[in-house]
Image: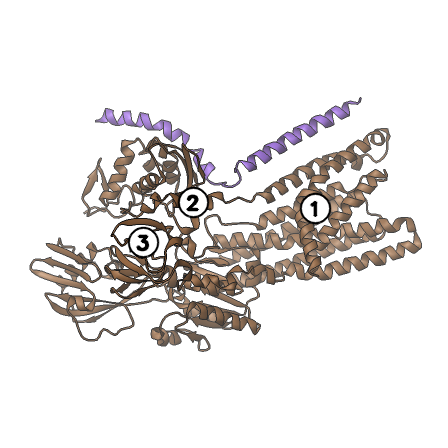
Amino acid sequence: MSVIYILLAISIIVAIGFFIAFIVAVKSGQYDDSYTPSVRMLFEDELIKDKPEKTILTKEE
Amino acid sequence: MKHKSCFHCGLDASSSEIKYDEKSFCCNGCKTVYEIFSANDLTCYYDLQNAPGATPKEIEGKYNFLDNAKIVEGLLEFDDEKTQIVTLYIPHIHCSSCIWILENLNKLDPSISTSIVNFGKKTVRVSYNTNNFSIKALVKLLSSIGYEPFISLDDYSVGKKHVDRSLIYKLGVAGFAFGNIMFLSFPEYFQVHGFWIEQYAPVFRWIMFAFSLPVVFYSAQDYFISAYKGLRSKMLNIDVPIALGAAVLFIRSTAEIILDIGTGFFDSLSGLIFFLLLGKFFQQKTYTFLSFERDYKSYFPIGITKIFSDNSEASIQVYDIEKGDRLLIRNEELIPVDCILIKGHARIDYSFVTGESEAVSKQSGDKLFAGGKQLNGSIEVDVLKTVEQSYLTQLWSNDVFSKNKEDGFTTLTNAISKRFTMAVLSIAMVATTFWLFTDTSKALNVFTSVLIIACPCAIALAAPFTFGNMLRIFGKLKFYAKNASVIEQLAAIDTIIFDKTGTITANKKTAIEYDGLQLSDDEESLLKSTLRNSNHPLSRSLYSLLNENEIVTLDNYEEHIGEGIAAKHNQKSIRIGSAPFVGYTSETASLNTAVYVSANNQYKGKFTFYNRYRKGLSKLFNTLKKQYDLVILSGDNSGEKENLTKLLPAKTKLFFNQKPEDKLEYIKHHQNSGAKVLMIGDGLNDAGALAQSNVGIAISENVNVFSPACDAILDATKFNKLHHFITASKSAIRIIKWSFALSFVYNIIGLYFAVTGQLEPVVAAILMPLSSISIVVFTTICTNVLGRKLK
C-alpha cells in the first residue's frame, strides 16, 4: 500500500477533528455572544488584586 | 462650593451631604449599594469604570407576583428540585463594571452558583440553589444593587425558546468541504498526464465526491426548497437558476468520475455554495440589543395584584383578569386592562402609547385605558375589559400583524432573475441544437456547461453584500434597519406619513412661556428652591429651564400628590401646581399643559408648556416635498394646527383626532391606489400604521428602551437626516445595478467557453470565485464611498 493512502487518511482525520471542534463550539453557544467574552477575559486579574489592595488600605490607617 | 458627583452613579452630589468612606453620594440608595459592595470586597466595581451605578428604586411589593408558582414556572429556563436557571433582561447593563458585578453575584449570595452576562442582549443568566433562595429573592437582590430587571409579558414562557443556528452550521460545512476539495483537486490541475496521476486520480475524485455530498444535500438545501416553492407558484426567483446550476454541477461531476472521463467540478460546486451562504450570513446582520417585533406584550406586566371581596390581596396572572375584578395598581406599575378608577389619585403616563410625555391626572370614576403607567402612589381600579379586548390591545387582532411584508414584494434580484433564467435557458437550447448537428458527442457537454457557468452566483451576491454593508453603515449613523429588504423598499417610496406627538415633536425639550405678574427676585429664588425638591416631571423640566438663582433652605415643604407643592421660607409661602390648588378659578380651558403659581396666597401667573418641534423639521419637510407627498396623522386635538401650517410646506396634509385604526385604514386606502408609503411614528398607537405601511420607521429617543414593532428604528437625534437615508438607499440600488452589469461581463466570458465546448474544470474553478470576489469587492468599495458621503 502506498504512503499516499496513509497521508490522505491522516489529513482527513485531522480536518474532521477541526470540523467537530467547530460544531461543538457552535453548539455550546460560543457564536451567540461575541462581545462579552472579550471583556470577561480581562477580569481575572481584578479578582486577585482585590485582597492586596485591602492590606494597603489598612497599613495607611 | 466645589462641584462633586456621586461616587456610585455620577449624578450631582454637591448638596446632598451624604458621605461614607470619604466618598460623596447623591442619595442614601447609592450609599447603600456602595456599602453592600464594600462589605463583600466588590469595590473593584468602581475601578473598572467611573461612577457606573444606578440608584436603586423602591420596589416594595412590586414583585409580589413572583410568589405565584404558575408565573414563576413560565419564567424559568430550567427547574429541578435543587437548581433553577433564569435569564433576566436588565436595561441598565452598559459597561464592563456591569458585567463584572453581575458575574460576581455569587459573592453577594452563596445560593447563586453562576451568573453569565450577555452584554449585547443586556441579559444575565443566573443559576441558583433553591434551598433558601428564590427568583423573587434574586430580583430583590438585583434591584438592591441598582440592577432592576425588566420582566414583561413577553418573557413569559421564553425559557423554551430555541436559537436557530442552522445557517452557521451550513456555512461551516460548506467552508470545510470547499477547503478540502480545493486541496484534493490541485494534483490534477498541476499534472495532467503521467503515471502517478493516472494511478491515484480515482481515489482523489471519490474523496471529493464524498466531501461534496453534505454540501449539496445539507448546505444547499434551502436553495432547492426555495426554487421548488418558486416554481410551484410560477415564479422564477433567483434561487431557480442557482438550484439548477448546483444540480447540474453535481450530476455532471458525478457522471464524469463514474465514467472516468474527467475530474468534475466539485471545487466550483462547493465554492459556489460557500460564497452564497457567506452572502446570506453577511446580510443577516442583526442588532442584538434591538427588537423589531415588539407588541404590547413587551410592555405589559406578567402579574398584577387582585383585591378580593374580603379585602385580601393576591397576585394573579394578567391573562386571568376577568371583567369586574378589582385590581391594585402600585406606583410605577402599568395598567394592563381598560378599567375605571375607584380609589386614589391617578397620574397616568401614556408615553408608551401616544408618545406624549406629559402625564394626565384622573379623578375617581374616570375611565383608564390599558398601557398607561401610574406615577403617583397606589390606585384601585375596576376592570371593564380583559387584556385582549382592551382599546389598545385589540389593535393586534388586525390582520396586518399576521402578514409578512417581505412576501408581497418582488426584490430587484428576483425581478432580474426571471429574464436571466429565460436568457440562459434559450442560450443553452440554441447552443445544444447547434452542436447536435455539428458534433453530437459534444452536445450534452455544452448544454451542462452553459448551465454551470451561467449559475448567477455573482448576481445573487450583489444584493446581500450591498445591503448588508448599507445596514452596517446606517447602524453606525443610528438608523437601524431590520433587514435588507427594508432598504430596497425605502428606495421605492413616494408618500411619507408622520405621526405628530413624539415623532415631529421632541419628548423632552419643551418650551415654556410665562404668563402673569412679574415675579420678584425673592419669589423666583423661592420658586426654584421649591421645584428643586420635587421629582414630578413638570417640576423637573421647569426647574431646568429657570434662570440660576440662589438656592435657599426651605423651612417647610409639602407635596400634595396629584395637586401640587407648597413651601415656606422666611414667612413667605408659595404654591405651585394645578389651577384649583393655587386658588385660581377663572379660565382653565386651555389645550396645553400649564403649571400655576401663587405666592403668599395671591395668584401670580402660569407657566405654559409647549411641545417643541424637532430641530430642522421645516428644512426636512421642504427638502422632502419636492419628491414625496407629505402627510401628518395626529391622534391629538387640532390645538397645534395653526402652528404646523406656519411651519410646514403648504401642500402638507394635516389630519387630527386619528384613532390607531384610522391611521391604519388611511395607509391602506392610499396603498390601494398605488402609493408606496413610509410611516414614521413612535408610540404603540402607531403600531398598526407601522405594520401596514411599506416601510415603518419608529423614532426613538433612547433606542435601548422602547419602540413598537417596525421595520427600522431611527435615533431621534438623526431625525433631520431622514432624507439622506432615503437618498442613500436609492444609491444602493444603483450600485446593485452596476454589479449586475459587471457580473454579466463575467457571464459572457464564461458562456464563450461553454458554448464553444471548451469549458475545463480549471476554467470554472478560476472564473466562478473570481466573479464572486470581484463583485464583493466592488460593492464593498462603492457602499463605503457612499457611507463616507453620508457623514
Q: Are marks 2 and 1 in contact (CB under 8 Å)?
A: no
- Does residue B110 show up? yes
Q: Position of residue B724 (x, y in %)?
A: 50, 62
Using the image as rendered, state which of residue B376 and residue B716 is in the foreground.
Answer: B376
Q: Which mark is residue B74?
A: 2
Compared with B409, B140 (above or below) is above
Q: Which residue is mark 1?
A: B272
Q: Quadrant of residue B182?
A: top right
- Which of pointers 2 and 3 indicates the residue nearer the eye? 2
Q: CA distance from mark 3 to mark 1?
A: 55 Å
Q: Secondary structure at mark 2?
A: helix
Q: Are marks 2 and 3 in contact (CB under 8 Å)?
A: no
Q: Is residue B245 left or right of residue B14?
A: right
Mark 2 crowdedness (10 Å alpha carbons): few <14, some 14-19, many ≥20: some
Say whether mark 3 and mark 2 are on the same chain: yes
Query: Among the chains, which one is purple?
Result: A
The total of numbered circles placed on residues is: 3
Q: Secondary structure at mark 3?
A: loop
Q: CA distance from mark 2 to mark 3?
A: 20 Å
